[in-house]
Image (cartoon, grey):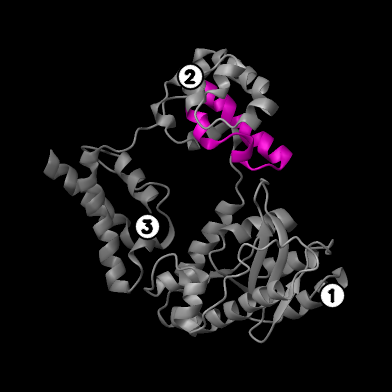
């Protein structure tokens, strides 16, 4: 257990001499906007080290380790871990080897959970007793310590199995390209002024209603960060669309909005009514444009043809097909020219996927358009 700054600095210096370290986090995020780190675990292939973030004040040695290009950082399904690191010390790991992603690159199931991957590759059935544990309590129980240490040990063992296979298949560059993109995305905060675009069903709203939604969503995003409060605890997602649609003008009408929590009405009701009035007063030339509607059912034929391109390459390469082309990429490509073309490759299609499939995807899209004409 590492619970002093000098200890952490000494161990980080040792870990920076290694080719890789396995890293895991335990955190709490039930009602807060930002995750609260309860424990960091490091595995070096021989043993586990547990870092107590409640006792550490100087994270600079840890930041140097995370950013050291000579040390591969091994994590599993790391999107939430990246948020923990970013909030805890303002840094993210590079280079990053995600064992869940590596398994998919080797043709195993897409998005395999950690316990299932450990069972599949190491033959170890992990206990699940501490997955919902309170990691901020002190002292930690023996069961918690054992659970956390095992995670770090087995994560290193997974890397020892997966890395040689990835290297033999020539896929490490592709994997690291994907994880670098994931890290880059994780460091970009949602622009409060654009938060309304992420609201479900927002495409149904008229520009005048979107003006109200924009004001509400911007306030929700800024205030959640300021209070360090989960967005849905501040104002539930499912209440956003009806608020912009019906625009209540008193507390009684506000309380009747679908999924509006009474606590929100008590604490922020008057503020919400003022925000609605602010949105209503927005000049017409400042109203947001209507958001794009979902693709029509007729576009499914083209989407299926494009998806087939990725599936064919996946079968040839022995990669999980879900890795090849994300739904967002396919829909952006279709929107670039639907229904009659010509189509353009979307900016979301990057890296090895663009190099491998870009020309083929364009050819399929434009050929399908000609057939439909």
The answer for how far apart the CA atoms under marks 1 and 2 are is 58 Å
Q: Nearer the viewer, mark 1 or mark 3?
A: 1
Compared with 235, 302 (above or below) is below
Rendered view: 54 above or below 205: below
Residue beneath label 1, please?
A: 7
Mark number for residue 246?
2
Say whether disc 3 or disc 2 marks the residue closer to the N-terminus: 2
Can you say which quadrant of the picture contains the N terminus? bottom right
The residue where tag 3 is placed is 354
Quadrant position of the C terminus in the picture: top left
Q: Position of residue 332 (x, y in %)?
A: 36, 44
Mark 1 to mark 3 CA distance (whole Å): 45 Å
Name the chief secondary structure element in magenta: helix
Q: Quadrant of residue 174?
A: bottom left
Q: Is residue 133 left or right of residue 182?
A: right
Which of 177 and 79 lies nearest the eye of the viewer? 79
Question: Magenta residues?
Answer: 212-241
- Give the quarter of the image for residue 128: bottom right
Regarding residue 210, the answer to whether it shows in the image is no
Q: Sort mark 2 into few (<14), some (14-19) or many (20+) by Cα contacts within 10 Å.
A: few
């Amino acid at each position: 257990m590492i619970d002093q700054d000098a200890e952490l600095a000494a161990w980080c210096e040792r870990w920076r001499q290694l080719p890789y370290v396995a890293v895991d986090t335990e955190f709490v995020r039930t009602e807060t906007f930002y995750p609260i780190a309860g424990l960091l675990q490091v595995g070096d292939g021989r043993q586990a080290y547990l870092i107590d973030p409640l006792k550490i004040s100087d994270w600079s040695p840890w930041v140097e380790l995370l950013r050291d290009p000579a040390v591969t950082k091994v994590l599993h399904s790391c999107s939430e871990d990246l948020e923990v690191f970013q909030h805890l010390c303002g840094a993210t790991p590079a280079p990053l080897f995600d064992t869940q992603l590596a398994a998919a690159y080797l043709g195993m199931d897409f998005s395999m959970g950690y316990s299932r991957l450990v069972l599949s590759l190491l033959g170890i059935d992990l206990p699940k007793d501490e997955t919902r544990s309170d990691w901020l309590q002190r002292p930690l129980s023996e069961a918690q310590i054992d659970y956390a240490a095992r995670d770090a040990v087995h994560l290193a063992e997974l890397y020892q199995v997966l890395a040689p296979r990835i290297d033999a298949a020539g896929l490490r560059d592709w994997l690291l390209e994907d994880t670098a993109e994931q890290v880059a995305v994780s460091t970009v905060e949602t622009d409060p002024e654009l938060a309304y675009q992420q609201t479900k069903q927002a495409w149904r709203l008229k520009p005048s209603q979107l003006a109200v939604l924009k004001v509400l969503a911007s306030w929700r995003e800024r205030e959640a960060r300021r209070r360090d409060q989960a967005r849905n605890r501040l104002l539930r997602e499912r209440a956003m669309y009806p608020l912009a649609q019906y625009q209540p003008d008193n507390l009684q009408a506000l309380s009747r909005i679908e999924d509006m929590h009474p606590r929100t009405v008590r604490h922020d009701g008057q503020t919400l009514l003022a925000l609605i009035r602010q949105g209503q007063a927005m000049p017409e030339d400042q109203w947001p444009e209507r958001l794009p509607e979902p693709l029509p059912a007729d576009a499914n034929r083209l989407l299926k043809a494009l998806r087939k391109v990725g599936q064919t390459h996946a079968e040839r390469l022995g990669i999980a097909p879900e890795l090849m082309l994300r739904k967002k990429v396919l829909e952006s490509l279709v929107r670039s020219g639907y229904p009659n073309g010509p189509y353009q490759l979307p900016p979301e299609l990057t890296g090895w996927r663009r190099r491998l499939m870009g020309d083929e995807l364009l050819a399929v899209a434009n050929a399908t358009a000609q057939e439909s004409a």
